[in-house]
Amino acid sequence: MTPEPGTLACTAAGGLLIHVEAERYRIAPEDVRSLIFSGRPAPVTCERVRRGDGVVTGQTTIEGHAAVNPAGRAVLVHTRTGSFIIPLVSLRRVARGEAASAPLFPLVPEMSI
């Protein structure tokens, strides 16, 4: 099963939103800066809202991570939904607000023969 392609967009505060199928993930602004400038892996979080007994609760959990690949030219995003890749230059353009969004390309696991 191949994951659906996703999109990457910037938040008003400078973080990143990752849309994959019906899921919406976030990377915090300070984690985006750390990822771009230091190459440190960044946690990918998701906020889940639960409604029950008239009470609405929000819970933010870490659902994956984003890391620059060893060659330094792309960012790999791993979530519960799947794994994706985006060129580092595209991620930088979105993070700086130069582009409204950029596509995430699904990574297909290698098939063994």
Image (cartoon, rainbow, N blue to C red):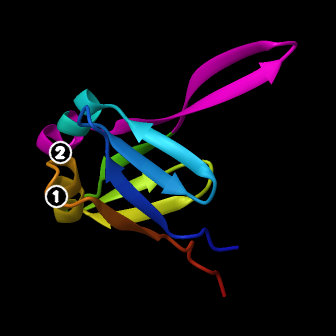
List x then y, in percent, for residue 81: 62, 54
Between the residue at mark 1 and the residue at mark 2, the CA separation in whole angstroms equals 11 Å
Task: Please identify the quadrant where the N terminus is shown.
Answer: bottom right
Which disc is residue 66 wearing? Answer: none
Please give the name of the residue rendered at 14% of the width and 48% of the height, measured from the top-left corner. 96
Please give the name of the residue rendered at 63% of the width and 54% of the height, measured from the top-left corner. 22
List x then y, in percent, for residue 99: 20, 61
Q: Nearer the viewer, residue 60 or 22?
A: 22
Disc 1 marks a residue whose amino acid type is Arg
Please give the name of the residue rendered at 37% of the width and 68% of the height, measured from the top-left corner. 103
Q: Is residue 46 magenta?
A: yes
Which residue is identified by label 2? 36
Disc 2 marks a residue whose amino acid type is Ile
Which residue is identified by label 1? 93
Residue 72 appears in view: no
Q: Would residue 18 appear left or right of 101 to someone viewing this image?
A: right
Above or below, 98 against 105 in this view is: above
Q: Earlier in the sequence, mark 1 or mark 2?
A: 2
Above or below, 71 against 25 in this view is: below
Q: Nearer the viewer, residue 55 or 96?
A: 55
Say which element carries label 2.
helix
List x then y, in percent, for residue 52: 84, 18
Q: Nearer the viewer, residue 4 or 71?
A: 4
Q: Would residue 12 appear left or right of 53 to someone viewing this image?
A: left
Residue 59 appears in view: yes
Residue stretch rendered in magenta on the structure: 34-63
Above or below, 21 against 62 in this view is: below
Main secondary structure of the magenta stretch: strand
Give the quarter of the image for residue 16: top left
Q: Nearer the viewer, mark 1 or mark 2?
A: 1
Give the quarter of the image for residue 93: bottom left
